[in-house]
Amino acid sequence: MSLLWGTIALLLVVIWVISIVDIVGRHLSAKHTAAWILIVVLLPVVGSVVYWAMRRQSAEEVQRQVDAQRDLRSEAERRPFDSRQF
């Protein structure tokens, strides 16, 4: 039973740390960063869940997704279509 609780505690600590690292790395304003860190530190589980639920993608993340989709489409267009596969 203690192994289960230890695993759950470790998972929660990992989520907590990832949340804090993401908050700091997002380059939010100083007020927003401080507020989110305070929320996540004071309410680790609830704060992390609320942060990830309310988190918006940055312009860089959106651009990376657009580029990845464009690359996939161009790769698919370059491949020859073989109707015998279907």
Image: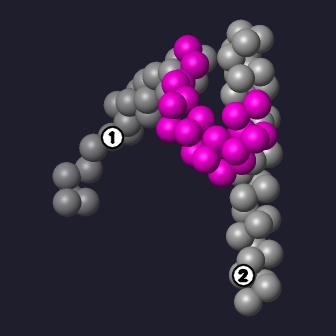
Label 1 residue SS:
loop
x and y, in percent, of residue 52 in the image: 57, 38
- Residue on which the image places disc 2: 4
Q: Quadrant of the N terminus?
A: bottom right
Three-letter amino acid code at disc 2?
Answer: Leu
Q: Which residue is mark 1?
A: 80
| 40 left or right, relative to 84 | right
Q: Residue at x 77, y 11 (%)?
A: 30
Q: List the single residue furthest toward the front.
A: 42
Residue 59, percent from left and from top? 55, 14
Q: Residue at x 71, y 47 (%)?
A: 44
Q: Nearer the viewer, residue 86 or 63?
A: 63
What sort of colour scheme is used for the picture?
Answer: one colour
* Above/below status of 39 relative to 18: above
Under circle 2, the secondary element is helix
Point 27% across, 44% down: residue:
81
* Segment colored magenta: 37-59
Question: Of circles 1 and 2, which is in front?
Answer: 2
Where on the picture, by quarter, is residue 5? bottom right
Q: Amino acid at mark 1?
A: Pro
Q: Estimate the x, y position of residue 56 in percent, counting from the top left.
A: 52, 25
Q: Which circle's residue, 1 or 2, is located before the other in the chain?
A: 2
Residue 65 bears which disc, if any?
Answer: none
Q: CA distance from mark 1 to mark 2?
A: 51 Å
